[in-house]
Image: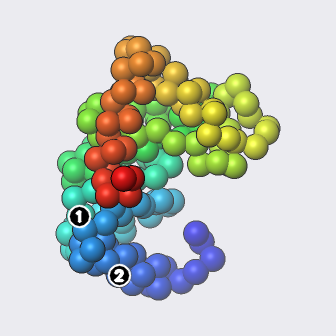
Amino acid sequence: YDHSDRAVQREIFAAQIALAHEHKLALVIHTRDAWDETFEILDSCGVPERTIFHCFTGSPIEAKKCLDRGAFLSFSGIVTFKKAEEIRDAAKICSADKMLVETDSPFLAPVPHRGVSNQPAYLVDVGACLAQVRNVSINEIANQTTSNALIAFAGLCA
């Protein structure tokens, strides 16, 4: 992420947003150390209807800014990490209809699987953490995030 010129990254990001608008596609964003720039470009280009912040690692402040723009927040194994309190706080304020779960396999294996390659089966650990943080059942997280994924990625599954 930090190996290419920021101006080039901004230009390509704007082009990706334009493609998402033109083809009515989901826009998947992985923001790292560039929240202000991300929001600035989204605001100037227009936020696509189905925008997903993949592997969300922001604070509740960034979460609110994403949610205010109608975006989905996708939580990975990072939410289970001991030092990820801000991400868990963001998960607490995320509206249920805008929450997604992911593994980011083969990276970022959730607790209790740290140190091994991540895999789709570990998605349940991410969901369990979110259920605990939000004080709801794992089934509620599973049902809601499945429904949200079908909306966020509409047209990809037949």
Q: Residue at x 31, y 77 (%)?
A: 19
Residue density around tag 2, few if under 14, some if 14–19, many if 20 or more, within 10 Å:
few
Identify the mark at residue 15; answer none if there is no mark.
Answer: 2
- In the image: residue 30, left or right of residue 62: right
- In the image: residue 143, left or right of residue 42: right
- In the image: residue 117, left or right of residue 13: right
Q: Outermost residue toward the front?
A: 158
Closer to the N terminus: mark 1 or mark 2? 2
Task: Identify residue type, mark 1.
Answer: Val
Residue density around tag 1, few if under 14, some if 14–19, many if 20 or more, within 10 Å:
many
Q: Residue 127: x, y in percent?
A: 49, 27
Q: Residue at x 67, y 28 (%)?
A: 111
Identify the mark at residue 47; answer none if there is no mark.
Answer: 1
Q: Secondary structure at mark 2?
A: helix
The quarter of the image holding the N terminus is bottom right
25 or 115: nearer the viewer:
25
Q: Residue 48: x, y in percent?
A: 24, 64
Q: Residue at x 38, y 57 (%)?
A: 156
Q: Residue 103: x, y in percent?
A: 58, 42
